[in-house]
Image (cartoon, rainbow, N blue to C red):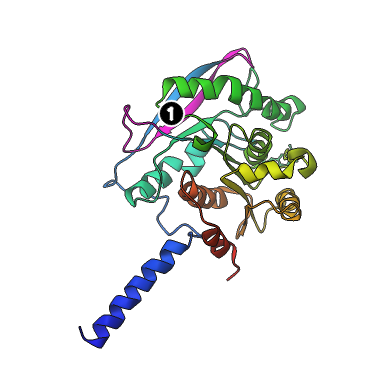
Amino acid sequence: MNKSILFTLGFILSGMFISAQTIDKQAPQGFDVEKKAFAHGKIDTIQYESKTVGTQRKALVYTPPTFKKGDKYPVLYLLHGIGGDEKEWFRNGTPQVILDNQYAQGKLMPMIVVLPNGRAMKDDRATGDIMAKDKVEAFATFEKDLLNDLIPFIEKKYPVKKGRENRAIAGLSMGGGQSLNFGLGNIDKFAWVGGFSSAPNTKDPQLLLPNPAKAKELRLLWVSCGDQDGLMPFSKRTHDYLVANKIPHIFYVEPGGHDFKVWKNDLYIFSQLLFKPLDQEKINNFLKIE
Ligand code: FER
């Protein structure tokens, strides 16, 4: 082998090594553009009986392109914001496209993604004054609906791997606050927790995590926010508390405001980390400021 071939080979191999050690920071162009040639997952609308609310409630469920009834899957519960409902992610964030594209590139552990309605009240539509007290309170009530009604329904109806290691919760804004509140409040139920641009409904750190050592049982704790987002203080104070208490986590400050450009990027990166072994070196590289 001559020297230049050896050099080229070495270069390619070192590139492979480096890329295996890093996590994408920004989704590449086209990550959210539907590719006809790729296999597509499926979206179902389901209805479940909510004892918490006393109604039949709706959710969307995305199953991956390789979905087979005989296999079992972990589940990501992906929550919407204050102006949304169970269709908000689907309409504005196109998770089905983002995930299909990643499956085609072998970037994801096959998982089921549930898009619930996080406003747990009889009229759960995002109409009228979305900031009204009863509507905001319904985002807190959703904890009971999720744990006692929706999760048991999903685990009965779909081939789901059970247990905390196979359950993730993440969301945007109000849904980010819910994910941190419910995830950190129920570490026995969720091992993977992500808050994207979390809203003021995020509990104060001392209430969110009164026993910080417990959070060491998490497989992933993700807190992210756009650098132009007015809600940054809620993510920052959570991050500061986690640092003060030496709790491993990802605090990702990304370019952008309070919008779907940021949340789609979060979903792209967060979903790649789910249900896989995660080494600290990879996380450290990701967090390094370039
Ligand atoms: C608030 C500001 C923003 C608030 C909620 C939000 C309940 C939520 C924003 C979103 O979900 O996008 O003061 O109070």
Instruction: Determine the residue positioned at 43% across, 59% down.
Output: 28
The residue carrying pointer 1 sits among few (fewer than 14), some (14 to 19) or many (20 or more) residues within 10 Å by Cα, namely some
- Can you give x and y, in whole percent of width and height, for residue 53 in the image? 64, 16
Going 37% across and 44% down the picture, which residue do you hit? 100
Residue at 47% x, 43% y is: 275
Asked whether 62 falls inside the magenta stretch, the response is: yes
Residue 218 is inside the magenta segment: no
Q: Nearer the viewer, residue 68 or 104?
A: 68
Tell which residue pokes out farthest to the left in this image: 1
Amino acid beneath label 1:
Val
Q: Is residue 125 above or below residue 39?
A: above
Q: What element carries label 1?
A: loop
Instruction: Estimate the x, y position of residue 123 in percent, counting from the top left.
Output: 63, 19
Quadrant in the picture for the C terminus: bottom right
Quarter holding the N terminus is bottom left
Residue range corresponding to the magenta coloring: 50-72
Q: Is residue 151 left or right of residue 228?
A: left
Tell me the quarter of the picture where residue 198 sits: top right
Q: Name the residue under label 1.
A: 160
Q: Which of 49 and 23 is in front in this view?
A: 23
Establish if 265 lies above or below 7.
above
